[in-house]
Amino acid sequence: MAAIQIRDVPEPVRARLAQLARERGQSLQSYLLDLVSDEVRRQDNLAVLCRFGEGRHGTRLTREDVVSPLHEARAARDESIRDESPE
């Protein structure tokens, strides 16, 4: 594994990070590794979402292809509920 060093961290920032680590029952090193790992995962997730948003992957369905059956199913459900309710 590689080592990463951060220089010139202001003391209040280091102190707050140490406090957050203690609150989680972790060493500062473990806490910072979790933070960095979470950021990498978030960026990977954003990259996937961007690829889908650009239309390179995913569906060829239009919004209407998805919404129309949903509205029809809800209307049928509502009608069946009305038919079953005592008057």
Image (cartoon, helix red, strand yellow):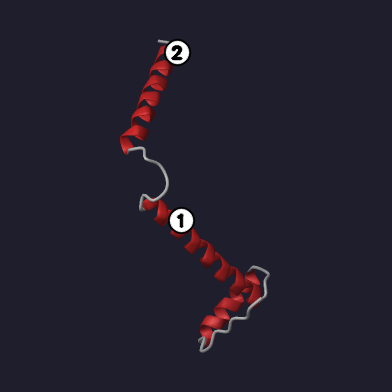
Across and down, in percent, residue 80 comes to 42, 16
Q: Is residue 76 shown left or right of residue 37? A: left
Quadrant of residue 15 within the rendered picture: bottom right
Q: Which of the pair 49/9 is nearer the observer?
A: 49
Query: Taking 39 as reference, is 76 left or right?
Result: left
Q: Secondary structure at mark 1?
A: helix
Identified by mark 1, the residue type is Val
Mark closest to the chain's N terminus, 1 or 2: 1
Placement of the N terminus among the 4 image quadrants: bottom right
Q: Mark 2 falls on what kind of element?
A: helix
Q: Is residue 55 above or below residue 2?
A: above
* Mark number displayed over residue 48: 1
- In the image as oriented, which residue stretches furthest toward the top? 87
Residue positioned 37% across, 40% down in the render: 60
Above or below, comparing residue 81 to residue 2 in the picture: above
Amino acid on which the number 2 mark rests in the picture:
Glu
- Classify residue 79 as left or right of residue 16: left
Q: From the viewer's perspective, is the residue at label 1 or at label 2 nearer?
A: 1
- The quarter of the image holding the C terminus is top left
Q: Are marks 1 and 2 in contact (CB under 8 Å)?
A: no
Which residue is pictured at 57% across the width and 67% down the height?
37
Q: Residues within 10 Å of mark 1 (few under 14, many from 20)?
A: few
Q: On the image, numbered disc 2 is attached to which residue?
A: 84
Relative to 73, residue 29 above or below = below
